[in-house]
Image (cartoon, rainbow, N blue to C red):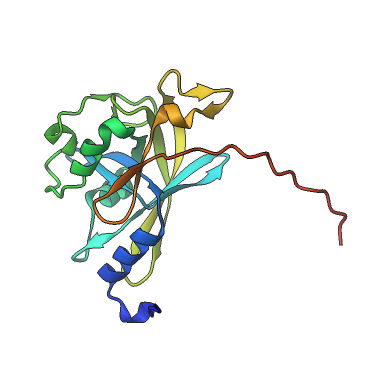
Amino acid sequence: MRIDPSDLAAEQAYRLLTGIVVPRPIAWVTTLSGDGVVNLAPFSAFTFVSPKPPMLAISVGRKAGVYKDTAHNILNNEEFVVHIADSTLMNAVHESSTEHPPDVSEVEELNLETVPSERVKVPRLAVAPIAMECRFRQCLEFGETRSRLLVGEVLVFHIRDGLLNNGKIETEALDPIARIGGPRYARLGEIFTLKPVFQTSKSPS
């Protein structure tokens, strides 16, 4: 089968790409509205873009020409918290994607407890095994849909006891969830440990 992207509407291309680019980690993001409402939403177009300083990026799209509350809140307040959810939180992550008016807090709707952050005003979720307090650093827009790539610098990592071993996260203990095509999620399958690949030194050309 051959598909020409120019023949696809934005929604069709989205459905195709989200089934191809799998599995995707999920950023579970809290932000604050101008009225102090705590917004919560999941984003599976998510990665890290720099280790020093540590920076994360999420892509926020538009629906009917309107950006999600998360994008407005981050650009207005320049603060947000990215959480990594485990499998026990799968239903809550999915339900937090429900669209609500800006004055409705998904945190309150889902009865999730929050705790104060250390470096930002946005609270973090008490139940999440990992939370990263972020300061907004850059926004880039892409494509005809003008999806916004929002980049934030991690100011503080909050990691549940027992997950960190010799500077590395114990992935099996974290038990993270991933997004695949449609309203479907996945857990980790079998994990393989391979020998490290070492770069050979080359003389300058």
- Along the horizontal axis of the image, is 107 left or right of 134? left
- Location of residue 96 in the rendering, given as x and y in whole percent from the top left corner: 20, 42
- Along the horizontal axis of the image, is 99 left or right of 18? left
Above or below, comparing residue 9 to residue 118 in the picture: below
Q: Quadrant location of the C terminus?
A: bottom right
Quick one: which residue is furthest to the front in this view? 190
- Location of residue 155 in the rendering, given as x and y in whole percent from the top left corner: 46, 33
- Along the horizontal axis of the image, is 202 left or right of 96? right
Q: Quadrant location of the N terminus?
A: bottom left
- Location of residue 164 in the rendering, given as x and y in whole percent from the top left corner: 50, 23
- Along the horizontal axis of the image, is 47 left or right of 67? right
Quick one: which residue is furthest to the top in this view? 161
Q: Which of the pair 12/184 is nearer the observer? A: 184
Q: Which of the pair 124/138 is nearer the observer? A: 124
Residue 119 in sight here: yes
Q: Which of the pair 78/88 is nearer the observer? A: 88
User: Residue 86 is drawn in which quadrant?
Assistant: top left
Above or below, comparing residue 50 to residue 20 in the picture: above
Which residue occupies 13% across, 47% down?
100
Which residue occupies 54% across, 22% down?
165
User: Residue 7 is drawn in which quadrant?
Assistant: bottom left
Above or below, comparing residue 113 to residue 2 in the picture: above
Which residue occupies 38% across, 36% down?
176
Residue 122 in sight here: no
Which residue occupies 40% across, 22% down?
160
- How many numbered marks are there? 0
- Location of residue 171 in the rendering, given as x and y in whole percent from the top left corner: 47, 32
